[in-house]
Image (cartoon, grey):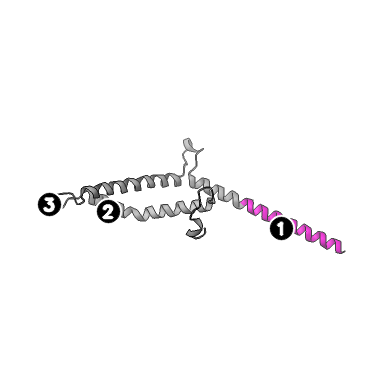
Amino acid sequence: MGSEGEEEGMTDHEMTPQQILERLENIKASLTALAPKINKFLKRLAEKDPITRKPRYGEKAVIRVKHAVRAYKALELGILGAFQDHTKPESAEQSSLVSNLQKQIQMQEEEMNEQRQAKQTQEQIELERVANEKL
């Protein structure tokens, strides 16, 4: 994948399957890195100040933390669904988004290899034709 600047302004329709897959993997890695911080917020949300017995966070902070946790959980659920591999018989016809992207990437690579081989074959035929003309 190119640099971040190359992808800026690109729509999903302009991105290659490889770029989409890499972006999903980056999001998954970011979520994994963010998990301890979210868990810390959740733990502190339930804590009370030992002296005043009031919640650690004020009313507005509680709302912000709850919104952040909800957004994190929604994104986490979406990413897990994208990476989920449906191997059970009842969902065998379904594939995860990532599996579909990987299949598409493989098909594109096979197509490019076939085109490359066809071009090499054509070049070889042309070289042989030119060599035969010289005889």
Residue pictured at 46% horizontal, 53% vertical: 23
Residue pictured at 48% horizontal, 59% vertical: 5
Instruction: Single out the residue that lies furthest toward the left.
Output: 51
Badge 3 marks a residue whose secondary structure is loop
Instruction: Single out the residue that lies furthest toward the top.
Output: 90
Q: CA distance from mark 1 to mark 3?
A: 79 Å
Residue located beneath label 1 in the image: 120
Q: Residues within 10 Å of mark 3 (few under 14, many from 20)?
A: few
In this picture, residue 19 sits left or right of residue 115: left
Q: Residue 32, position in %: x, y?
A: 37, 54
For marks 1 and 3, the one nearer the N-term is 3
Q: Amino acid at mark 3?
A: Thr
Q: Nearer the viewer, mark 1 or mark 3?
A: 3
Q: Residues within 10 Å of mark 1 (few under 14, many from 20)?
A: few
In the image, 134 versus 95, the foreground residue is 134
Q: Residue 105, position in %: x, y?
A: 56, 50
In this picture, residue 29 sits left or right of residue 126: left
Q: Does residue 122 show up magenta in the picture?
A: yes
For marks 2 and 1, the one nearer the N-term is 2
Residue located beneath label 3 in the image: 52
Q: Quadrant of the C terminus?
A: bottom right
User: The magenta stretch spans which residues?
Assistant: 110-135
In the image, 116 versus 14, the foreground residue is 14
Q: Residue 35, position in %: x, y?
A: 33, 53
Residue located beneath label 2 in the image: 40
Q: CA distance from mark 2 to mark 3?
A: 21 Å
Q: Amino acid at mark 1?
A: Gln
**Principal secondary structure, stretch drawn in magenta:** helix
